[in-house]
Amino acid sequence: DGFRDLLAEAGVTYLVADWTRRDPDISRFMEGFGRAGVPLYVHFDADGEARVLPQVLTLAALRDAFTD
């Protein structure tokens, strides 16, 4: 509850990458963050800086990520 509202409030665009067929582009993206599997949550700030988020997300963690 509140996830979509938080995205709208923060002006965040939400993107889902489906890795069920082991897409090589998604694999390279994950490898760039030192990861070999999912879930991988990455937030890009307005300057394009990436930050890997925890595997278990809470609204509080997202709110912190969106306001840092």
Image (cartoon, rainbow, N blue to C red):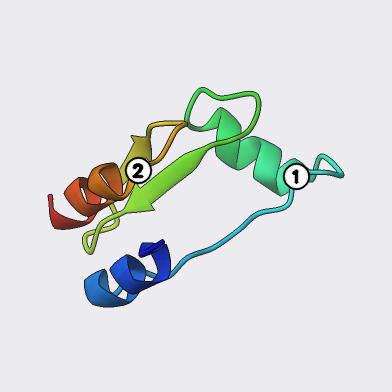
Identify the residue at the far left of this view.
68
Which residue appears at 82% of the width and 39% of the height? 22
Q: Amino acid at mark 1?
A: Trp
Residue 46 in the image, given as x and y percentages of width and height = 23, 64
Residue 59 in the image, given as x and y percentages of width and height = 31, 50
Q: Judging from the image, what secondary structure is the residue with disc 2 in?
A: loop
Tell me where residue 11 sits by quadrant.
bottom left
Residue 63 in the image, given as x and y percentages of width and height = 22, 53
Residue 40 falls left or right of residue 4: right
Location of residue 46 with respect to 5 vertically, above or below: above
Cα–Cα gap, marks 2 and 1 = 23 Å
Which residue appears at 76% of the width and 42% of the height? 24
How many residues crowd mark 1 within 10 Å: few (<14), some (14–19), many (20+)?
some
Residue 38 in the image, given as x and y percentages of width and height = 63, 33
| Label located before the other in sequence (2 or 1) | 1
The disc label shown at residue 58, or none: 2
Which residue appears at 58% of the width and 29% of the height? 31
Depth check, front residue: 15 or 23: 15
Identify the residue at the far right of this view.
21
Identify the residue at the far front of this view.
1
Residue 16 falls left or right of residue 5: right
Q: Which residue is mark 1?
A: 19
The disc label shown at residue 33, or none: none
Disc number lying in front (2 or 1): 2
How many residues crowd mark 2 within 10 Å: few (<14), some (14–19), many (20+)?
few
Residue 12 falls left or right of residue 22: left
Depth check, front residue: 43 or 8: 8
Quadrant location of the N terminus in the rendered image: bottom left
Q: Judging from the image, what secondary structure is the residue with disc 1 in?
A: loop
